[in-house]
Image (cartoon, grey):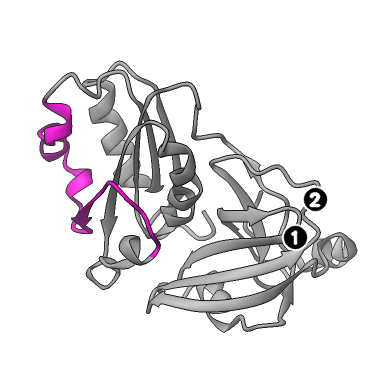
């Protein structure tokens, strides 16, 4: 979905984008990571790993976020938000408090998980933590590994969120260096040669790491860029 629409279009379709969920609870895992639990009618929503929901962050602006977990019977779901910079989405999410109402669309998009593969690898950053949480219960049935590139202030977040089998890397553009990525220990043996690889987060990191993997492994590579420096609303 587009990240913004003209005011007249917003007015025209205002009823279909009216508030449909309420904030039940908020908490900060770190100064940049905010967990929010919502309640609404989600009985007809399809929750697939990799799908994203559109959050209306102003009259004319929208942003995509992934749902970390949900309970259809109770009508409850949770999103892990990355609060950073001065973007309109970050500013809006930072202000949300208990009982606030807003519009969030049903999830839709691109699947990142294939259940029949016995080895699963996941790469991402702060914007990818919700997907990782959604994946974890499924991955516990197979061999899996998480790689996260995170800012220093967020290095404890995966542990606080209960994630497992993860390796942390500083957000210093390592995964934009083909030579460095090619020498990762995981790629020096054939153990992960036929695994499924899911790459999400920063577009440049995802693109470079995908290029390296295509020359190294035989398994499937699923990728989705969530943000790019200087690109609004991706």
Q: Residue at x 31, y 32 (%)?
A: 210
- Between the residue at mark 1 and the residue at mark 2, the CA separation in whole angstroms equals 7 Å
Q: Quadrant of residue 146?
A: top left
Left or right of 126 on screen, residue 13: right
Residue to which mark 2 is pinned: 43
Residue at the farthest front position: 141
> Which residues are the magenta region?
161-188
Q: Residue at x 55, y 73 (%)?
A: 88
Residue to which mark 1 is pinned: 75
Q: How many marks?
A: 2
Q: Residue at x 68, y 55 (%)?
A: 71
Q: Is 189 in front, or is 81?
A: 189
| x, y percent for residue 48 | 61, 40
Q: Is residue 187 magenta?
A: yes
Left or right of 38 on screen, residue 113: left
Q: Is residue 50 magenta?
A: no
Q: Is 131 in front, or is 16?
A: 131
Q: Quadrant of residue 47?
A: top right
Q: Is 94 in front, or is 205?
A: 94
């Amino acid at each position: 979905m587009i990240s913004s629409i003209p005011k007249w279009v917003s007015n025209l379709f205002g009823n279909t984008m009216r508030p449909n969920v309420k904030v039940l609870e908020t908490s900060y895992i770190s100064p940049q990571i905010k967990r929010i639990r919502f309640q609404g009618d989600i009985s007809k929503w399809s929750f697939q790993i990799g799908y994203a929901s559109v959050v209306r962050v102003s009259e004319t602006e929208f942003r995509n976020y992934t749902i970390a977990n949900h309970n259809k019977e109770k009508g409850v779901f949770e999103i892990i938000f990355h609060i950073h910079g001065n973007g309109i989405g970050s500013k809006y999410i930072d202000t949300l408090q208990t009982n606030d109402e807003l519009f969030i669309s049903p999830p839709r998009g691109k699947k990142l998980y294939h259940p029949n593969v016995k080895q699963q690898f996941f790469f991402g950053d702060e914007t990818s933590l919700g997907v990782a949480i959604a994946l974890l219960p499924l991955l516990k049935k197979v061999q899996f590994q998480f790689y996260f590139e995170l800012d220093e202030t967020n290095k404890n977040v995966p542990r606080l969120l209960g994630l497992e089998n993860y390796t942390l890397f500083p957000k210093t553009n390592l995964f934009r260096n083909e030579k460095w990525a090619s020498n990762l220990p995981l790629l020096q043996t054939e153990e992960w040669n036929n695994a499924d690889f899911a790459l999400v987060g920063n577009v440049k990191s995802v693109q470079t790491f995908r290029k390296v993997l295509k020359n190294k492994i035989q398994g499937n590579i699923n990728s989705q860029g969530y943000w790019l420096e200087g690109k609004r609303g991706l």
